[in-house]
Amino acid sequence: GNSVTQMEGPVTLSEEAFLTINCTYTATGYPSLFWYVQYPGEGLQLLLKATKADDKGSNKGFEATYRKETTSFHLEKGSVQVSDSAVYFCALSREGKLIFGQGTELSVKP
Amino acid sequence: DSGVTQTPKHLITATGQRVTLRCSPRSGDLSVYWYQQSLDQGLQFLIQYYNGEERAKGNILERFSAQQFPDLHSELNLSSLELGDSALYFCASSVGRAGGQETQYFGPGTRLLVL
């Protein structure tokens, strides 16, 4: 079946550190891939997306590349800020619905 | 602000009761989706409506039902509530029928607590 697996959190980093959150997926065909972010007490916001292999999604300094050969969509940011503290969800789209990973909590300390 | 609105923001009720959650999609969006977020199950897709018609169904219990009205707002009805139904319920919307490339925009959620 279709599924998404993310690295377990919480991830704790110091400000300006490099961030990687791993995401791998299992799916038939070539789904679109998404990263959503949930700030405390808020709903989900789209962070970035990629719709085909080798596409790179980017937004607010975050990047992720759709890797078909490794079925991965890892999220990266070169220098995190305290304001990036949130829960990050990787998701794939299949038959109209989003299938989410379990979420990775990121905490950035000043 | 995604443009998707949900009411109420919080809901506290007792087991066995029935509640209705309301969602208004972004202007121009024809699809509405409902998701449940709980600690043990994570984020789960419940159901999708497109222009008034049910289009896709996920892990939605028989005690739950939804509909989309002519003005495109949607309601999720939860009945015979159990403690395990306590969760955050999100509504999302998208422009079309959600071919795989479409982006879904999420509302702020309704937090349901069943006591």
Image: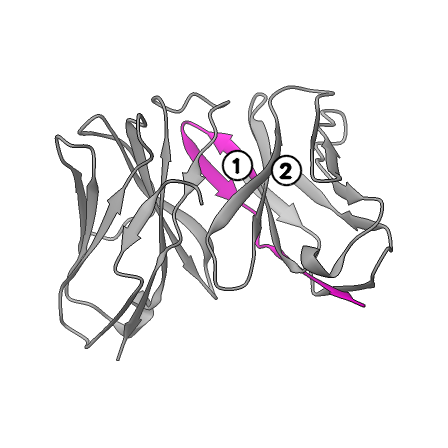
Q: Which of the 4 image quarters holds residue A59?
A: top right
Within the magenta stretch, is there residue B86?
A: no
**Are circles 1 and 2 on residues that touch, CB within 8 Å?**
yes
Residue B66 visible (yes or no): yes
Discs 1, 2: same chain: yes
Residue at (26, 80) in percent of width and height: B115
Between A31 and B73, the residue placed more toward the observer is: B73
Q: Which of the 4 image quarters holds residue A73?
A: top right
Q: Position of residue A27 (x, y in %)?
A: 57, 31
Numbered circle sitting on residue A84: none
Numbered circle sitting on residue A2: 1
Q: Is residue A99 left or right of residue A34?
A: left
Residue B57 visible (yes or no): no
Direction bottom: furthest residue: B115
Which amino acid type corresponds to the residue marked 2 in the rendered image?
Answer: Tyr
Q: Position of residue A68 (x, y in %)?
A: 71, 24
* Magenta-colored segment: predominant secondary structure: strand
Q: How many tags in the picture?
A: 2
Residue at (51, 22) in percent of width and height: B101
Residue bounds of the magenta highlight: A91-110
Which amino acid type corresponds to the residue marked 1 in the rendered image?
Answer: Asn
Subunit of mark 1? A
Task: Examine the rendered structure and indicate whether residue B11 appears above or below residue B29.
Answer: below
Residue at (69, 55) in percent of width and height: A84
Within the magenta stretch, is there residue A103?
A: yes
Q: Is residue B113 left or right of residue A75?
A: left
Mark 1 or mark 2, earlier in chain: 1
Q: Which residue is mark 2?
A: A25
